[in-house]
Structures are given as structure tokens and as C-alpha cells.
Amino acid sequence: MEESTAREKILKRVRDALIEKTETPYPILDQDSSVYQDIADPLDVTFAEELVRIAGKFVYCESDDEFISSLKNFILEKNWGVLYCQDSKIHAILKSGGIPFESRTDAFKEAHIGITRCEYLIARLGSVMVSTRTSPGRRIICFPEIHLILAYSSQLVPDLKQALAGIKKKYRDNYPSMVSIISGPSRTADIEKTLVMGAHGPKELYVFLIDDSTT
């Protein structure tokens, strides 16, 4: 009987609280303005600084030709071997520069280095937004030890908010099956608080940014 009475008292207080209207304690709270300070530097500079801060590598290219030249130098200097790529738009660029690549599905398991495009570069975070629309599925951005990303300056946005708005506008009601954010190489410190690179994905991340602001 006492338990029932106590329960009824609690329920009565809940009902009274729901019925009674109280004024908001912070009536002039600004919920629309950004919590971040404005980005002072150009977006490409901010992105490069933040990407390097999280152990990514940034390569600026003034044109497609310079991208090809830079990529060839990396392939030779680092002995990367043949790139794995299943993106037809990147195929055309690689073919024009005489850079060999592998695209056969059955060769994927042996892929050491993969190259993809992206959706947006988020300057404030130094992060890359990718989706299944700019890459043939999820595997190539996760499995190869080295992930190269080809991007253009027109894909730079200040914050995640603009990137998400861009995805919504671009695809409307036909969203990609996967949209993800890459923030530097894969890493974990779950085991004895020791930082391990490449735990759940690529050990190295390179972003090649081609300046298309004058085109």
C-alpha cells in the first residue's frame, strides 16, 4: 500500500511538471551564431596546416600536369610501385601522364597503394569527406596501406556544416550509401595507450590538391 502511494506521488509530480509551463532560464541565448572563430587564413592553407597536424601529408599542385609530375616523383622516390585505382575519371588523368595503374577487381587484395577522389575538404578540421559516389565502394579507402586522395581547390569548405549541406544539395533524395570523414591516417591507442598507426585502415594519407580557381 505504501509502495502504491509513493508511486502515485511520483507520477503526480511528473504530471504537474508537464502541465506547468516555466520560462526558459536563458531567453537571449544565441543558438544561430557559429561557436568557431572565423578562419583568417586562406582555406587551402588552413586545411594543409590541420592535415599535417593530424599526421596527413599535403601536396599542392597548380595544375593537372604538376599533379602528374609530383605523383611520378613520389612513385620513384618511395618505390610505391603500381597504383590501384577503379575510378574512371582518375584513369584518364593517369593515362595522360603515362602512369601505370591496376584496376582489376581480382588484384585488389594485393593493392599496396590506392588512389581516389573525394567529396569535400574540410579546412578547419583538416579532414576529407568521401562517399561511395566518388570511389568504387568502401574497400579502396580502407584496405591499402597508403591512400592517395585527388582533390581540387573548389572542393574546399570551411566547416563540416558546409560539407553536409553540399552533399544534400548535390545528391538531393538519392544519397550515397556511405558518407564518411577521414581525419589523417588510421590510428588507435586502445592497447596499453600506445599509438599504433594503420590499425583500422591506411598507415599513410596523402592529399594532392589541384588549384582549379582560375579555370
Image (cartoon, grey):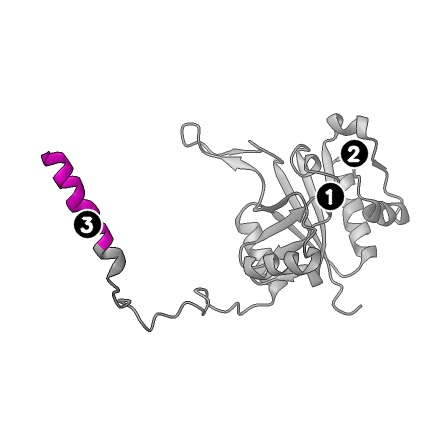
Which residue is depicted at the point 25% across and 65% down? 22
Q: Circle 1 is placed at which residue position? A: 135
Using the image, tell me which numbered label, if any, was put on residue 57.
none
Q: Secondary structure at mark 1?
A: loop
Which residue is depicted at the point 62% across and 50% down? 128
Image quadrant holding the N terminus, namely: top left
Q: What residue type is disc 2 on? A: Gly
Q: What residue type is disc 3 on? A: Lys
Dot 3, how many residues are within 10 Å of its Cα: few (below 14), some (14-19), or many (20+)? few
In whole angstroms, how far apart are the C-alphas of marks 2 and 1?
A: 21 Å
Q: Secondary structure at mark 3?
A: helix
Q: Observer-nearest residue: 59 or 141?
A: 141
Which residue is depicted at the point 78% across and 36% down? 84
Is residue 5 found inside the magenta-colored segment of the image?
Answer: yes
| Residue 63 left/right relative to 181 | right
Among numbered discs 3 and 1, the one appearing first in the sequence: 3
Report the magenta residues as a range: 1-15
- Residue 146 vs 9, above or below: the answer is above
Which residue appears farthest toward the front when viewing the image? Answer: 1
Nearer mark to the viewer, of 2 and 1: 1
Q: What residue type is disc 1 on? A: Ser
Q: Circle 2 is placed at which residue position? A: 81
Using the image, tell me which numbered label, if any, was put on residue 12.
3
Nearer mark to the viewer, of 2 and 3: 3
| Residue 7 left/right relative to 25 | left
Is residue 138 found inside the magenta-colored segment of the image?
Answer: no
Q: Observer-nearest residue: 24 or 84?
A: 24
